[in-house]
Amino acid sequence: MGAGNGNTIRGVIRHRTTQEYYAGSGRWTNIAGEAMAFDSLTGVVAEAQKYGIHDCCEFMMSLPGRPGFTISLPL
């Protein structure tokens, strides 16, 4: 996902109840830096379908150059 200025919007999946981050391959972590980063909604949807991630989580995107600004989309 591009922001139109060469910056890439990236996001992670976070569990709404446990606040854990999705680390990939069906694994979860408490450490945000270990989360699997996605740069497309297509990748998020494919991973969510593959590992049964639904009705529990949100895809959280942050915008380059906008610290503290986050967009959350329910999965």
Image: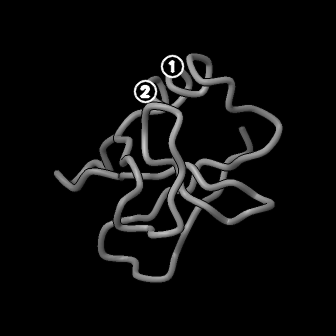
Question: Contact (CB < 8 A) between labels 1 and 2?
Answer: yes
| x, y percent for residue 3 | 32, 51
Please state which of residues 48 and 72 is positioned toward the viewer in this rendering. Answer: 48
| x, y percent for residue 51 | 59, 24
| x, y percent for residue 22 | 52, 48
| x, y percent for residue 11 | 44, 52
Please state which of residues 3 and 75 is positioned toward the viewer in this rendering. Answer: 75
The residue type indicated by label 1 comes to Ala
Please state which of residues 69 and 36 is positioned toward the viewer in this rendering. Answer: 36
| Relative to 62, 33 lies left or right | left
Please, what secondary structure does the residue beneath circle 1 have? Answer: helix
Q: Looking at the image, which residue is at 40% across and 82% down?
A: 67
| Residue 50 to residue 40: above or below | above
The residue type indicated by label 2 comes to Gly
| Relative to 73, 61 lies left or right | left
Please, what secondary structure does the residue beneath circle 2 have? Answer: helix
Quarter of the rendering occupied by the N terminus? top left
CA–CA distance in space, label 1 to label 2:
5 Å
Seen as rendered, the residue at the extreme left is 6
Say how many tags the image has.
2
| Relative to 11, 37 lies left or right | left
Label number found at residue 43 = 2
Q: Looking at the image, which residue is at 30% across and 44% down?
A: 2
Look at mark 1 in the image and give the residue it sits on. Answer: 46
Quarter of the rendering occupied by the C terminus? top right
